[in-house]
Image (cartoon, rainbow, N blue to C red):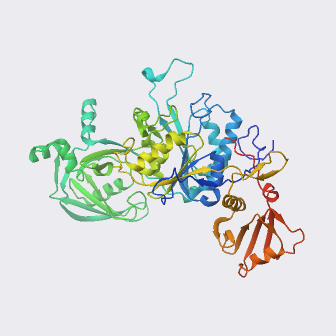
C-alpha cells in the first residue's frame, strides 16, 4: 500500500484500481421518454459509475445539489440491492462515485449523503479526503423510526436504531450560499390549545394596536460607534388578546390571524444594545413606559437597513414580535420553529408506503425530507441529481418543486418504480407526498436513456477487440467523441469539436494522403483536426495540424473496456 504521508482512510484495494473506465454514451429510448422533452431532465438506466462517467464532460460543474441514499452495507439483503458488500468493496464503490460526483457539483453546490451508523464514520473520513475537511458543512441526525411498541423490533444487546444521518459537503465552502432555514410548522390556534392543555404559558398575548407618537430624546452608540436614536412613545395603545376577542367578538384563532403583525411578547435579551439604551435614558432622566430605538444593524437578517425596536417598563423588556416566528399560509397562521441538526421524520414515515404508489421496503425516503433539502439548498430551475435513485422519490420531489433533475438507477425497478412514479407526477395523478402542500397540478417531462454497451468488445474467436456489432456508425462516432473529450455535433465533414478551432472526423474507410487533403479543404486558418479510422496509409506525411489515430488500437491505449462494477 502506498504511503501518502497524510491523514486518510485506507483499505484493501484502495490503490489497486485505475481510473480508466471507458466513458460510455447514453442512448435515448424515445418510447420511454415522457411529457415535455425540452426540460433538460433525464432518467437514466444503467450502472451508476458508468452513467456518471458518461455525464462527466458535459455536466462538470453544473449540478447545484446532489442527494444520494446509497446502500448502507448493513449486512442485510434487500429485495432490490445486494446490501452486504464486503467493507473494502463498499469503500471502493463509494470512493469511485464520490470523486465523479464532486466533479459534477457546481462551485456553489452541495452534496447530501444519507447513511446509517454502520458506515457513517468511515464515510465521513472518506468524504473529508475527497471533498476536503474544510468543505464539511454539517451532519444531520434524522429520526426515521418509532422504536416503541411493535415497530421497535425484538430485544437485543444493541440499542434499537431509530436515527439515520445525512452528511453535507460543499464543493467550495467559500462560494456556497447560505442555506435557507428549515422549519417545522404548527397552526397557531392548535399550538395555543396544546400549550394550554400541557400547562405551558403562551407568551404572545398582547398587541401594539397603535405605536403612538415618537419623541426624540437623544442618542447613544453601539459597539462600532454607530448611532442609536432613542425615542419615548406617547398615546400608544396596547391591548391583550382577550380584550380584542371581547371588543371585536371574534375567536382567539381569528385574533392571531388578523393581528399577527401587531402581537408581541416581552423578553430580557442578552444584547449589547439594551444596556447602552438603558444607561443613556437614565443619564437623560426621561420617564416613560414605552421607548423605541432606531439604528442600522451591521449583522443579522436586518443588516444594512433602519431597524426599529421597542422596550417596555423600567426593566426595558424588549418586544419580540409574533410575525418574526410565524407564516401566513392560506387562511391559517403557523408558528415556524427553526430546525438545527436533528430532524424528526417519524410522522412522515407513517404513510410512506403509499407515497408515489410504489413499494420499496427499507429504502424509501419521505418526500417531505427531500423537499426540505431542495428548498434549503436550491432555487426553482436549479439542476439536482440522485445517482442511487431507488424508488424515484428524489425526481418526484424535484419535479413537484420545479427543479431540473437527473436520476440514475441500474435496477429493473427503473421501469417498475421510477418511471411509473414520475409519469404519474407529470400527469398530475400523483397526489401523495408533498403534492397537496405545494399545490401540484402536473407538468414537466424528461428524456429516458439507456447506458450503451461498451464500444469495444472481445472478438468471439480471435484474441483482439472489435467494434461492438450492436453499434451503429453514429453511435461509434459519438462514443469516440466522448472518449476524446469532443462535443458530438456532426456538421459537414466534421463530427464534433473540442473548441472553435479543433475538430474530429471518424471514418470506417481507408485513410491516405488524398483522403486527408480532401478534409483539409474544410479547415480554416489556425484550425486543427483529429481523424479516427480503422485502416490508414503507413507512410503519410501529415500536416502539423492533423493527427490520425486507429480504431481500436488508440482507443485501447486510453481506457479499459471491461465494463462496470456495481
> Could you tell me residue 146's position as x and y percent?
44, 28
| Whether residue 59 is situated above or below residue 190 in the rendered picture | below
| Whether residue 474 is situated above or below residue 364 in the rendered picture | below
- Answer whether residue 303 is visible to the viewer in this image: yes
The residue at the point 62 percent across, 54 percent down is: 26
> Could you tell me residue 554's position as x and y percent?
81, 59
| Whether residue 532 is situated above or below residue 419 in the rendered picture | below
| Front position in the image: 12 or 295 | 12
- Asked which quadrant contains residue 288, the reply is bottom left
> Could you tell me residue 391's position as x and y percent?
50, 40
The residue at the point 68 percent across, 39 percent down is: 91
Residue at the far top in the pictured view: 155
- Asked which quadrant contains residue 174, the reply is bottom right
- Answer whether residue 166 is visible to the viewer in this image: no
> Could you tell me residue 461's position as x and y percent?
83, 45
| Front position in the image: 529 or 436 | 529
Residue at the far bottom in the pictured view: 525
| Left or right of 190 on screen, residue 346 | right
Amino acid at each position: 500500500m502506498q504511503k501518502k504521508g497524510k491523514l486518510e482512510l485506507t483499505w484493501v484495494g484502495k490503490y489497486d484500481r485505475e481510473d480508466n473506465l471507458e466513458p460510455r454514451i447514453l442512448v435515448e429510448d424515445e418510447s420511454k421518454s415522457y411529457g415535455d422533452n425540452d426540460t433538460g431532465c433525464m432518467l437514466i438506466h444503467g450502472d451508476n459509475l458508468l452513467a456518471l462517467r458518461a455525464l462527466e464532460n458535459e455536466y462538470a460543474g453544473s449540478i447545484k445539489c446532489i442527494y444520494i441514499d446509497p446502500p448502507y452495507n448493513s449486512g442485510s439483503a434487500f429485495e432490490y440491492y445486494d446490501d452486504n458488500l464486503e467493507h473494502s468493496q463498499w469503500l471502493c464503490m463509494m470512493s469511485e462515485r464520490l470523486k465523479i460526483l464532486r466533479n459534477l457539483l457546481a462551485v456553489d453546490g452541495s452534496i447530501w449523503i444519507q447513511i446509517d451508523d454502520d458506515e457513517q464514520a468511515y464515510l465521513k473520513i472518506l468524504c473529508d479526503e475527497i471533498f476536503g475537511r474544510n468543505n464539511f458543512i454539517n451532519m444531520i441526525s434524522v429520526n426515521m423510526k418509532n422504536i416503541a411498541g411493535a415497530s421497535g423490533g425484538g430485544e437485543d444487546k444493541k440499542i434499537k436504531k431509530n436515527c439515520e444521518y445525512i452528511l453535507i459537503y460543499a464543493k467550495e465552502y467559500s462560494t456556497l450560499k447560505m442555506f435557507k432555514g428549515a422549519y417545522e410548522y404548527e397552526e397557531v390556534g392548535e399550538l395555543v390549545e396544546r400549550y394550554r392543555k400541557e400547562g405551558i404559558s403562551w407568551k404572545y398575548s398582547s398587541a401594539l394596536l397603535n405605536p403612538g407618537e415618537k419623541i426624540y430624546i437623544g442618542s447613544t452608540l453601539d459597539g462600532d460607534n454607530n448611532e442609536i436614536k432613542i425615542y419615548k412613545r406617547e398615546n400608544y395603545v396596547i391591548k391583550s388578546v382577550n380584550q380584542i376577542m371581547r371588543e371585536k367578538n371574534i375567536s382567539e384563532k381569528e385574533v392571531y390571524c388578523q393581528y399577527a403583525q401587531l402581537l408581541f411578547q416581552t423578553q430580557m435579551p442578552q444584547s449589547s444594545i439594551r444596556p447602552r439604551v438603558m444607561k443613556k435614558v437614565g443619564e437623560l432622566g426621561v420617564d416613560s413606559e414605552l421607548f423605541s430605538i432606531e439604528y442600522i444593524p451591521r449583522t443579522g437578517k436586518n443588516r444594512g437597513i433602519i431597524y426599529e425596536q421597542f422596550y417596555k417598563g423600567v426593566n426595558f423588556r424588549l418586544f419580540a414580535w409574533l410575525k418574526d416566528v410565524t407564516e401566513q399560509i392560506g387562511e391559517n397562521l403557523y408558528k415556524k420553529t427553526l430546525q438545527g441538526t436533528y430532524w424528526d421524520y417519524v410522522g412522515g414515515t407513517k404513510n410512506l408506503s403509499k407515497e408515489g404508489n410504489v413499494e420499496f421496503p427499507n429504502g424509501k425516503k419521505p418526500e417531505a425530507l427531500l423537499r426540505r433539502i431542495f428548498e434549503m439548498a436550491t432555487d426553482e430551475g436549479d439542476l439536482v441529481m440522485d445517482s442511487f435513485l431507488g424508488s424515484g422519490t428524489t425526481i418526484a420531489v424535484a419535479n413537484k418543486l420545479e427543479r431540473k433533475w437527473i436520476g440514475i438507477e441500474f435496477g429493473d425497478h427503473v421501469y417498475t418504480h421510477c418511471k411509473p412514479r414520475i409519469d404519474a407526477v407529470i400527469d398530475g395523478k400523483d397526489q401523495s407526498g408533498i403534492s397537496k402542500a405545494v399545490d401540484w397540478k402536473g407538468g414537466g417531462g424528461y428524456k429516458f436513456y439507456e447506458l450503451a454497451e461498451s464500444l469495444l468488445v472481445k472478438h468471439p474467436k480471435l484474441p483482439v477487440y472489435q467494434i461492438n456489432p450492436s453499434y451503429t456508425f453514429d453511435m461509434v462516432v459519438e462514443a469516440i467523441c466522448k472518449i476524446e473529450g469532443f462535443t458530438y455535433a456532426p456538421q459537414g465533414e466534421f463530427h464534433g469539436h473540442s473548441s472553435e478551432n479543433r475538430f474530429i472526423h471518424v471514418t470506417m474507410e481507408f485513410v491516405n494522403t488524398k483522403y486527408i487533403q480532401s478534409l483539409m479543404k474544410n479547415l480554416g486558418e489556425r484550425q486543427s483536426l483529429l481523424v479516427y479510422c480503422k485502416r490508414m496509409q503507413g507512410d503519410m506525411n501529415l500536416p502539423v495540424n492533423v493527427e490520425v489515430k486507429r480504431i481500436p488500437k488508440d482507443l485501447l491505449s486510453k481506457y479499459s473496456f471491461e465494463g462496470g462494477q456495481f
